Amino acid sequence: MTEHEPPEADSGRPGLGGRVLLLPIRGYRRWISPLLPPSCRFYPSCSTYAVEAITVHGALRGSWLAARRLLRCGPWHPGGMDPVPPRRGSRGSESTDQERVHHTPAEE
């Protein structure tokens, strides 16, 4: 973990701010959503997207992504697959991790 990454970046768990933001989403999913007919235009659903965005990106960026997603939810948008984007800098991380391993001449 670098000094600029939020603490939740390594653990896969949201920080305190993220956990606070997840409370109303959990409440919606538990008490309000079961009373409404299924009508989400997207996969995953907006609440699932919000939980994943906050968990992956943290409270600030995750909230921004969730708000953008909710604004797209309407009759003017066709919907469809809309996954949470990967964390910045995580593309090709497997190959870069292997490239970062330093071998001593005895190990090669």
Image (cartoon, rainbow, N blue to C red):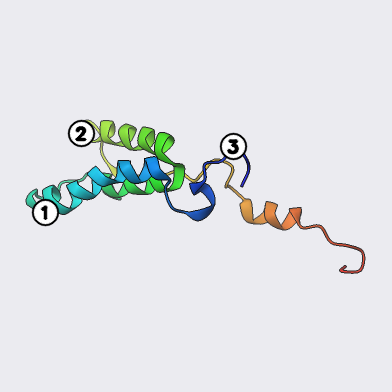
In three-dimensional space, the C-alpha distance between marks 2 and 1, rounded to whole angstroms, equals 20 Å
Q: Which mark is residue 34?
A: 1
Q: Quadrant of the C terminus?
A: bottom right
Q: Earlier in the sequence, mark 2 or mark 1?
A: 1
Asked whether disc 2 touches disc 1, contact meaning CB atoms under 8 Å apart, the reply is no
Quadrant position of residue 76: top left
- Residue occupying the far front of the picture: 16
Does any portion of residue 81 appear in the rendered image?
no
State whether residue 73 is above or below residue 34: above
Residue 59 in the image, given as x and y percentages of width and height: 40, 38
Q: Residues within 10 Å of mark 3 (few under 14, many from 20)?
A: few
Q: Where is mark 2, residue-wise?
A: 74
**Residue 47, percent across and down?**
26, 46
Identify the amino acid type marked 2.
Gly
Q: Residues within 10 Å of mark 1 (few under 14, many from 20)?
A: few
Q: Give how far apart the Cα atoms at labels 2 and 3 are.
A: 36 Å
CA separation in Å, label 1 and label 3 = 39 Å
**Which residue is drawn at the image coordinates 75% and 53% (left, top)?**
100
Is residue 23 at all visible to an observer of this figure? yes
